[in-house]
Image: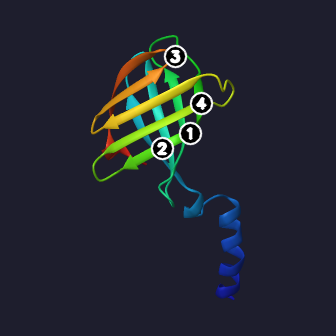
Amino acid sequence: MPRRLLALALPCFLLLGLSPAFANGSLQCDGRPYAVEIQFSLSTGQLTELIVARTGPGTEGSERFTLQQRFVDHRQQLMRVRGTGLERPQVAVALRVAGATGTLSYRGAQYELRCSWTALG
């Protein structure tokens, strides 16, 4: 009987999204006036999305970007991504990360960010 319960439980876990194949992680980079979250698949390591959010008091909202170019080297802590807005494809973004320092190019300006590779997850 326990084997039958296990056979029934596995599809339930998969439906609930508890499978590692569907798990995502993220890298956070903080700065002013923007913070960035880079999402990636834990199973493949593939970068999947970039989110830019305003920081500071009274600021709300964020903008999501589909990635066109992506490169990441976890061992050397290097990352380069470029993307366009999901809702506004004419808005482009670029992010370069080397160690704990990130540079966000967004809306015609560049912003310095602090990134933590140890906080992945």
Mark 1 is surrounded, within 10 Å at the Cα level, by few (under 14), some (14 to 19) or many (20 or more) other residues, namely: some
Give the structural element (helix, strand or loop) at label 3. loop
Q: Amino acid at mark 4?
A: Thr
- Dot 2: element: strand
Q: Amino acid at mark 2?
A: Arg
User: Camera-side residue: 1 or 68?
Assistant: 68
Residue at x 71% of width, y 70% of height: 11
Pointer 4: what residue?
84
* Residue under numbered circle 1: 67
> Which of disc 3 and disc 1 is earlier in sequence?
1
Image quarter for residue 90? top right
* Residue 81 on image: x %, y %: 46, 38
Residue 9, x across and y down, in percent: 68, 73
Q: Amino acid at mark 1?
A: Leu
Say whether disc 2 or disc 3 marks the residue closer to the N-terminus.
2
Whole-Å distance between the Cαs marked 2 and 4? 12 Å
Residue 70: image tag? 2
The residue carrying pointer 4 sits among few (fewer than 14), some (14 to 19) or many (20 or more) residues within 10 Å by Cα, namely some
